[in-house]
């Protein structure tokens, strides 16, 4: 999956673009919420969210900074999710599936936003998972890579009061 460079390229037609503009205004005016939206509107809002956080979107205005040295791969995310599911950990599955902000729903455009308290919770879940020496990872380098590219990010963000975390899944 790649980001849309030109906002006009991200929509099928003028109607979808008009819906997106209305949803963006709604989100900016009253906060990001999927409550009361139809399935197609939720899909369009997923696109709006991803474009807003894109470097051609609002990332400069929001003062967003990349915090991960390297992205984690889908293989790494799926390995984490398998281990998390076997241990009843609840937040780590968003790494592979994404999650619409403020819901438990999967987005049509894979992304997730963690509230500050969720950053701390994910850090705790991932730390416990990586500390479990009984886990046999599919590839030995997965644990080391996840430590440096995800756990370190969660440490950094969790250590700064009030910071949320946005991630896009590719």
Image: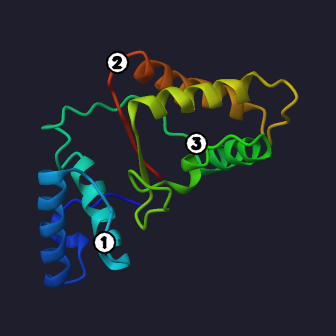
Q: Residue 161 carries which label?
A: 2
Which of the marked residues, 1 or 2, is nearer the chain's N terminus? 1
Report the residue at 28% width, 65% height from top. 45
120 sits to left or right of 36: right
Percent coordinates x, y for residue 92 in the rendering: 60, 42
Residue contact between numbered discs 1 and 2, judged by CB atoms under 8 Å: no
Percent coordinates x, y for residue 21 in the rendering: 12, 67
Report the residue at 22% width, 45% height from top. 55
Residue contact between numbered discs 3 and 1, judged by CB atoms under 8 Å: no
Find the residue positioned furthest to the right.
134
Percent coordinates x, y for residue 145 in the rendering: 62, 30
Residue 23, image quadrant? bottom left
Residue contact between numbered discs 3 and 2, judged by CB atoms under 8 Å: no
The residue lying toward the viewer, choosing from 155 and 55, is: 155
Mark 3 — residue?
Answer: 91
Mark 1 — residue?
Answer: 37
The residue lying toward the viewer, choosing from 21 and 136, is: 21
């Amino acid at each position: 999956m790649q980001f849309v460079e030109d906002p006009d390229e991200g929509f099928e037609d003028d109607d979808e673009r008009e819906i997106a503009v209305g949803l963006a205004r709604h989100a900016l005016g009253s906060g990001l919420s999927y409550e009361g939206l139809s399935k197609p509107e939720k899909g369009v809002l997923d696109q709006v969210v991803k474009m807003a956080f894109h470097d051609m979107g609002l990332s400069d205005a929001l003062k967003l900074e990349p915090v991960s040295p390297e992205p984690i791969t889908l293989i790494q995310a799926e390995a984490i999710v398998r281990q998390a599911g076997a241990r009843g950990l609840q937040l780590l599955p968003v790494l592979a599936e994404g999650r619409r902000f403020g819901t438990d729903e999967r987005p049509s455009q894979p992304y997730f936003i963690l509230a500050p308290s969720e950053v701390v919770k994910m850090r705790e879940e991932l730390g416990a998972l990586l500390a479990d020496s009984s886990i046999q990872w599919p590839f030995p380098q997965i644990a080391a890579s996840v430590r440096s590219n995800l756990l370190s990010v969660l440490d950094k963000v969790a250590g700064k009061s009030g910071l949320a975390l946005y991630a896009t899944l590719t």
